[in-house]
Image: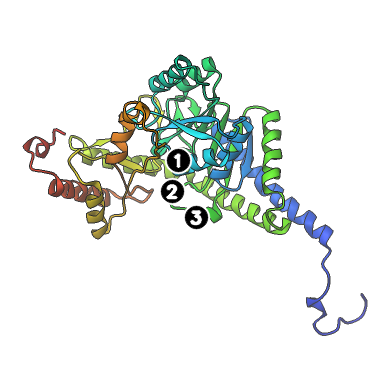
Amino acid sequence: MTGELPFGSIYTLEPDTDRLDADIARLVSRECTQLENELCELTASAFCVLSPGGHRALNLALRAAGVNPGERVLCSGLATDSQIQAILLTGGVPMLVDINPNTFNIDPYCLEYVINKCRRTSQPVPRVLVAGDLFGLPAPHEALEEICGRHGVALVQDLSESLGSAIGQRYAGAFGRFGVASLAMEPTASRAEEAGAVFCRTSGEAAVLRELLCEIEGGSAEPWRLAGEEWARASVALSKLEELSRQLKARTKAAERYRKCFRGSLRVQQVPDGYKSAWSRFGVLLPAGVDREALIAGLHQLGIPCEGMRRYTTGAQDDWERVMLRNSQSAASRLMTIPIHPYLTRNVAEYIAGQVLCEIERLAAPDPFYRNGSK
């Protein structure tokens, strides 16, 4: 076009869509490639495939592991809602494994027992285990890897709460066949800004994951909108990764303050020797006689946000629920999480812990043994 443009024509000119598409593709590719590289370095994984949200990442890993409709998938008796939903979305059926009452994560001995019981009763052994890292503490993945390897079970580590944690020299994400993560990095973050990631070991598995992602996302929205959302998620996740190391140190310090306050009064999650927790949430195990809902309501009135632990139930009426998940049942009815974040000062931590203990004492039945701090 030559000469002066007529009034208003700048708003009606057709853009060079081919060039615009190429520019958007380069922008998205640069952000996503940088994020994938940083995540691979952080987890010591060979390959990383981004996805829209941690829930979708776990769904991708389960599909890549070959979960078919109607198949049972092993998971913790304290599996999170997102883990259960991802299993159900693939058509799988959750099969619960009891926990260690000290760490609240899957107990390897219970996993071995479940697998052996399947063999004794001529039931097919589930082909996939989803092992989540509750409250940021890695499950005993080295032991789980050994058991899964002997029985032909694919281990999928869910490190949505434990990014940056480690067992010895191995970081979360480097265990099992797949690792999955939510990059929201806070339990309360909006799903609109949440990116997810799947970690795998071979280029072939990465290619399968990308094909599955294209199959799921294809046609779900306009290409421009999908590209914009993908770029936004990657940008937000990159900014959070820059702060991850500092936040992990601050959360660890906040957790130590809580542990000191509750020592001798309440049981908290134990961190085994050689383990490094990300402390995404801080869980306390309440005494058996305390009404957890009343306690939570009382703390909310004091301005202390906290919540109880919910547990998925299969609805089975056999001994599986009644006998084989005793630790999970007990913990689910007594676990409560209290606020933990990088800006938790000593005074605030002591105030929260003090109010928790005061409310427990108020609600508990008179019991001199408990009042002496022996429970």
Quickly name the residue at label 3: 190
Occupied quadrant, residue 2: bottom right
Tag 3, which secondary structure?
A: loop
Amino acid, disc 1 = Glu
Spot occupied by residue 177 in the image (x, y as percentages of width and height): 58, 27
The image's mark for residue 161 is: 1
Q: Residue at x 37, y 48 (%)?
A: 341
Spot occupied by residue 301 in the image (x, y as percentages of width and height): 24, 60
Q: CA distance from mark 3 to mark 1?
A: 15 Å
Amino acid, disc 3 = Ser
Specify the farthest residue to the bottom.
7
How was the colour assigned to the protein in this rendering?
rainbow
Q: How many marks?
A: 3
Image: 219 above or below 116? below
In the rendered view, does 309 fall on the left or right side of 248? left
Residues at discs 2 and 1 in contact (Cβ within 8 Å): yes
Q: CA distance from mark 2 to mark 3?
A: 9 Å
Ranked by sequence position, the earlier of labels 3 and 1 is 1
Q: Viewer-proximal residue, 6 or 142?
A: 142
The image's mark for residue 187 is: 2
Tag 2, which secondary structure?
A: loop
Amino acid, disc 2 = Pro
Q: Viewer-proximal residue, 112 or 375?
A: 112
Q: Residue at x 13, y 49 (%)?
A: 362
Q: CA distance from mark 2 to mark 1?
A: 8 Å
